[in-house]
Amino acid sequence: SSEQGKSTLGVGVGFPYGAIGARFGVNVIDHLTIFGGVGYHLSCVGYNIGLLIDFKSKTATQFYLTGMYGTNAAIKVEGLSEYDKVYTGATFGLGIKINSKRREGNFWDIGVLLPIRSSSFKDDETQVENDPRISEFTKAWPIGLVIGYNFGL
């Protein structure tokens, strides 16, 4: 799944997949992938474009580092649509690719991401937290998780 010219189409959850959606990637050189993902992010479309560099391994499992830009936060408040918004920013992470032994080019993608959230998101999150009309609010997690399955094309 890491050779130059190979491409993949994956489905999964996490920012590289637009939250819940799909990701398309192309290896521009060995072990360097450019990808784009689009999916459902709470109430809107989420997207990300980025790079993934994986490292050679003698086993089916490869370690990778990634960086991307796109949707990395959202606020949705039932009954108060003025707060409903998605936010963009940079996100960085690491993970593992578990390459299929049955189908060359297919792999599982499991990772942890650190989103760099915008000041407008942080301000809006604080505003929602302090709004007396809102009794329950869950703050955004400081990290994101990724799990997906990618098919070699």
Image (cartoon, rainbow, N blue to C red):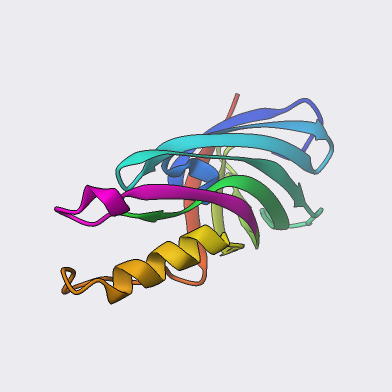
Which residue shows up at 42% across the image and 37% down it?
39
Which residue shows up at 78% across the image and 25% down it?
5
Is the C terminus in the top left, top right, bottom left or bottom right quadrant? top right
Q: Which residue is nearer to you in this view: 133 or 47?
A: 133
Is the N terminus in the top left, top right, bottom left or bottom right quadrant? top right
Picture quarter containing residue 12? top left
State left or right for residue 101 relative to residue 149. right
Question: Relative to residue 37, is residue 122 depicted above or below?
Answer: below
Question: Relative to residue 153, is residue 27 depicted above or below?
Answer: below
Q: Is residue 60 magenta?
A: no
Which residue shows up at 61% across the image and 31% down it?
8
Regarding residue 11, the answer to whether it shows in the image is yes
Q: Which residue is nearer to you in this view: 75 or 58?
A: 75
Picture quarter containing residue 110? bottom right
Question: Relative to residue 139, is residue 147 depicted above or below?
Answer: above
State left or right for residue 65 relative to residue 83. right
State left or right for residue 42 relative to residue 91. left
Residue 120 pos. (x, y %): 51, 59
Residue interval drawn in magenta: 76-91
Q: Which residue is nearer to you in this view: 5 or 145?
A: 145
Residue 80 pos. (x, y %): 19, 54
Q: Is residue 88 magenta?
A: yes
Which residue shows up at 48% across the image and 67% down it?
122
Q: Give the tally of numbered discs.
A: 0
Residue 64 pos. (x, y %): 71, 56
Residue lying furthest right in this view? 29
